[in-house]
Image (cartoon, helix red, strand yellow):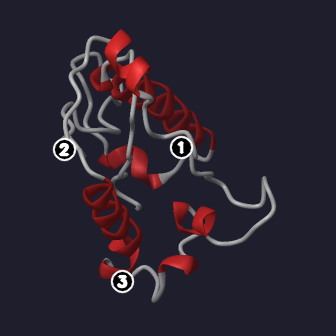
Amino acid sequence: MPDHIHLILNPIECDISLIMRKLKGKSAKLILDLLRRENHSLLSRLKLNSAGRDCAVWLKDFSSVDLWSEKFIIQKLGYIHANPVRAGLCDHPVKWKWSSYHAYLPHDLGDVPLEMDMGGYWKPEEFSKAGGQARL
């Protein structure tokens, strides 16, 4: 999406807040570097801090929802894939270049910008080792 992203993450030994902080920091630097190189008009729309440096590519906070069932994950994945259609950016999820929708269709490895992680579910022994409690 032009103004936000959706992710489904399943970190077993890492805090999602840490992942988001690193993702936002690295991507903000890359975005700002690109905008500066191109002297893009978007630079003037970003907030400035007291030192006069642009600093608000991303909001400070993020929202997260725990996905505890395969049914809930599939529902959220459908929501994510339909998001560009609801926003009027395309008429079908397959037409949104940066969607993981493409990864669920037959394709050669490397032909889509995002691949799904087929090992997305934790094994019971991994979950126990990380100090989690199984939810059924």
For residue 57, above or below residue 133: below
Question: Tag 1: residue type?
Answer: Leu
Q: Are discs 3 and 2 less than 8 Å apart at CB?
A: no
Q: Position of residue 110 (x, y in %)?
A: 78, 53
For the residue labelled by badge 1, is the local secondary structure a helix, a strand or a loop? helix
Q: CA distance from mark 3 to mark 2?
A: 25 Å
For the residue labelled by badge 3, is the local secondary structure a helix, a strand or a loop? loop
Q: Nearer the viewer, residue 6 or 133?
A: 133
Residue 119, quarter of the rendered image:
top right
Q: Nearer the viewer, mark 3 or mark 1?
A: 3
- Please name the residue that numbered disc 1 is placed on: 35
State the quadrant of the C terminus.
Answer: top left
Q: Nearer the viewer, mark 2 or mark 1?
A: 2
Asked if residue 22 lies left or right of residue 128, the reply is right
Disc assigned to residue 65: 2
Q: Position of residue 93 (x, y in %)?
A: 48, 78
State the quadrant of the N terminus.
Answer: bottom left
Residue located at (53% from left, 73% from top): 96
Residue located at (31% from left, 38% from top): 58
